[in-house]
Image (spheres, helix red, strand yellow):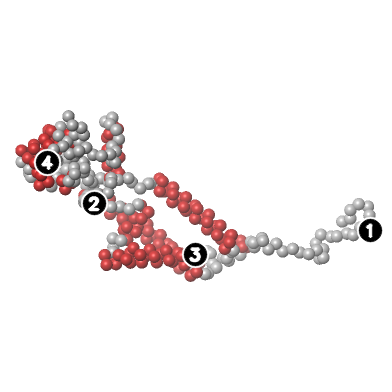
């Protein structure tokens, strides 16, 4: 096209073969036109994988915030009623280690061998699976291994949780975090301050009293602990005199309770029960 009124001006047409074609090497090829083919690892594939990883991580964090690890009492190695349980996302591994072929003499296989094999397979997957096919239904081996791993994790998690619930029913045990919630609720309803597990317990009054030896002989300390701080579902007896009277304590020792406290009417005489109840009634948070 000519500009102005000069008829001798040179005319250059768009698309003229004399125009040098420039190759934009920095523009990646469009791989969407080639289904099933590979694409540039950086930045195409890496960006997609990073976005998928971010979504999975956010979902995992949402689950951990919605269902946080329960807060129990301080660790007590003498508490035989405690049922150890890991966080929910480790339940499948916890259940796996219960089987005989990955525990006992084979514990190294369960703790190092199988997890190492799983993580090693994920690490070596880009090098072992070099096929260019991206559609999952045309990758039977990789897809089958993924589905098998997912089904195994779900199954082991469910079996582990069901077994834990069964143990709670058999032993008549209330989980520590639920017990703490009930204690806090009862204190709130009674107008008392929220129990503080980290606070120092009340001192034992008359620790050398013969009732202490009598309780040890009657196996009371096996549940309530030798320092009377309690363990598991057995409550602490320090300061029990602030909550119950002499008669109420004697009634509980004689007939037991519905919360797992057995009756001692057939193990101790009335005089022994009265002696223990009288001593426990003296256990107060402050001396009178």
In this view, the residue in front, 139 or 16, is 16
Judging by the rendered image, the residue that carries numbered circle 2 is: 77
The quadrant of the picture occupied by the C terminus is: top left
- The residues bearing labels 4 and 3 have C-alpha atoms spaced at a distance of 76 Å
- The residues bearing labels 1 and 2 have C-alpha atoms spaced at a distance of 104 Å
Give residue 242's quadrant in the image: top left
Q: Is residue 195 above or below residue 33?
A: above
**In the displayed structure image, the side of residue 97 where residue 1 appears, left or right:** right
Judging by the rendered image, the residue that carries numbered circle 4 is: 208
Task: Give the residue displayed 94% in from the left and 58% down from the top.
Answer: 8
Q: Nearer the viewer, mark 4 or mark 2?
A: 4
- The residues bearing labels 4 and 2 have C-alpha atoms spaced at a distance of 25 Å
**Of the image marks 4 and 2, the number of the one nearer the N terminus:** 2
Judging by the rendered image, the residue that carries numbered circle 3 is: 137
Q: Is residue 101 above or below residue 284?
A: below
- Residues at circles 2 and 3 in contact by the CB criterion of under 8 Å: no
Task: Give the residue displayed 82% in from the left and 65% down from the top.
Answer: 18
Task: Give the residue displayed 30% in from the left and 45% down from the top.
Answer: 72
Q: Nearer the viewer, mark 4 or mark 1?
A: 4
Total tally of numbered discs in the picture:
4
The x, y position of residue 194, in whole percent, is 30, 35
Q: Secondary structure at mark 4?
A: loop
In this view, the residue in front, 113 or 146, is 113
**Of the image marks 4 and 1, the number of the one nearer the N terminus:** 1
Q: Secondary structure at mark 2?
A: loop
The quadrant of the picture occupied by the N terminus is: bottom right
**Of the image marks 1 and 2, the number of the one nearer the N terminus:** 1
**Of the image marks 3 and 1, the number of the one nearer the N terminus:** 1
**Label 1 environment density (alpha carbons within 10 Å; few <14, some 14–19, many ≥20):** few
Judging by the rendered image, the residue that carries numbered circle 1 is: 8
**Of the image marks 2 and 3, the number of the one nearer the N terminus:** 2
**Of the image marks 4 and 3, the number of the one nearer the N terminus:** 3
């Amino acid at each position: 096209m000519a500009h102005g009124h000069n008829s001798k001006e040179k005319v250059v047409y768009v698309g003229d073969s004399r125009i040098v074609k420039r190759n934009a090497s920095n523009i990646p090829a469009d791989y969407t036109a080639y289904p099933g083919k590979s694409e540039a690892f950086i930045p195409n594939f890496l960006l997609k994988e990073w976005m998928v990883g971010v979504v999975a991580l956010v979902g995992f964090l949402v689950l951990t915030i919605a269902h946080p690890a329960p807060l129990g009492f301080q660790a007590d190695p003498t508490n035989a009623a405690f049922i150890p349980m890991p966080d929910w996302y480790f339940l499948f591994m916890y259940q796996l280690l219960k089987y005989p072929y990955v525990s006992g003499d084979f514990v190294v296989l369960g703790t190092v061998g199988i997890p190492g094999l799983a993580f090693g397979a994920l690490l070596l997957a880009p090098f072992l699976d070099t096929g260019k096919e991206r559609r999952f239904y045309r990758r039977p081996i990789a897809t089958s291994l993924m589905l098998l791993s997912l089904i195994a994790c779900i199954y082991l998690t469910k079996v582990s949780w069901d077994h834990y619930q069964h143990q709670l029913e058999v032993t008549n045990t209330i989980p520590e975090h639920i017990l703490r919630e009930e204690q806090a609720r009862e204190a709130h309803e009674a107008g008392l301050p929220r129990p503080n597990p980290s606070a120092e317990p009340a001192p034992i009054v008359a620790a050398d009293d013969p009732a202490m030896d009598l309780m040890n002989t009657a196996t009371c300390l096996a549940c309530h602990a030798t320092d009377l701080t309690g363990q598991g579902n057995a409550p602490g007896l320090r300061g029990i005199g602030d909550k119950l009277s002499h008669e109420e304590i004697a009634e509980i020792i004689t007939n037991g309770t519905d919360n797992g406290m057995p009756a001692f009417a057939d193990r101790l005489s009335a005089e022994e029960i009265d002696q223990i109840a009288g001593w426990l009634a003296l256990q107060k948070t402050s001396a009178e």
